[in-house]
Image: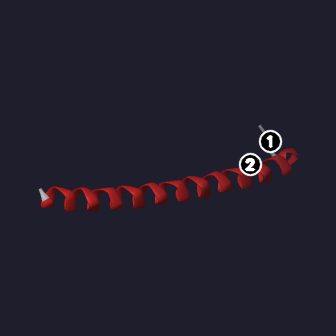
Amino acid sequence: MEKVYKMLKNVGGGSIAIGVLLIIAGITFGVINIVNGAILLKNRRNILF
């Protein structure tokens, strides 16, 4: 029974770590998208179709 608790502890800690990393990555990519969108809006007169 003790093995199960140790395994659950390790898996739970790993899941929390992965979750935090995914949140940080999501925020980072969101900020990059906002910055790129602002640059496109700023230079929209130079874009030709």
Q: Position of residue 41 (x, y in %)?
A: 82, 46
Q: Position of residue 10 (x, y in %)?
A: 27, 62
Mark 2 to mark 1 CA distance (whole Å): 17 Å
> Is residue 45 or residue 36 the one in the foreground?
36
Q: Which residue is mark 2?
A: 37
Quadrant in which the C terminus appears:
top right
Q: Earlier in the sequence, mark 2 or mark 1?
A: 2
Q: Quadrant of residue 15?
A: bottom left
Q: Quadrant of residue 35?
A: bottom right
Q: Quadrant of residue 17?
A: bottom left
Q: Amino acid at mark 1?
A: Leu
Label 1 neighbour load within 10 Å: few <14, some 14-19, many 20+? few
Label 2 neighbour load within 10 Å: few <14, some 14-19, many 20+? few
Q: Which mark is residue 23?
A: none
What secondary structure is found at the residue carrying circle 1? loop
- At horizontal 27% and vertical 60% (from top left) the residue drawn is 9
Circle 2 or circle 1, nearest the eye: 2
Contact? badges 2 and 1 (CB < 8 Å)? no
Q: Position of residue 1 (x, y in %)?
A: 11, 56
- At horizontal 32% and vertical 56% (from top left) the residue drawn is 12
What secondary structure is found at the residue carrying circle 2? helix
Q: Which residue is mark 1?
A: 48
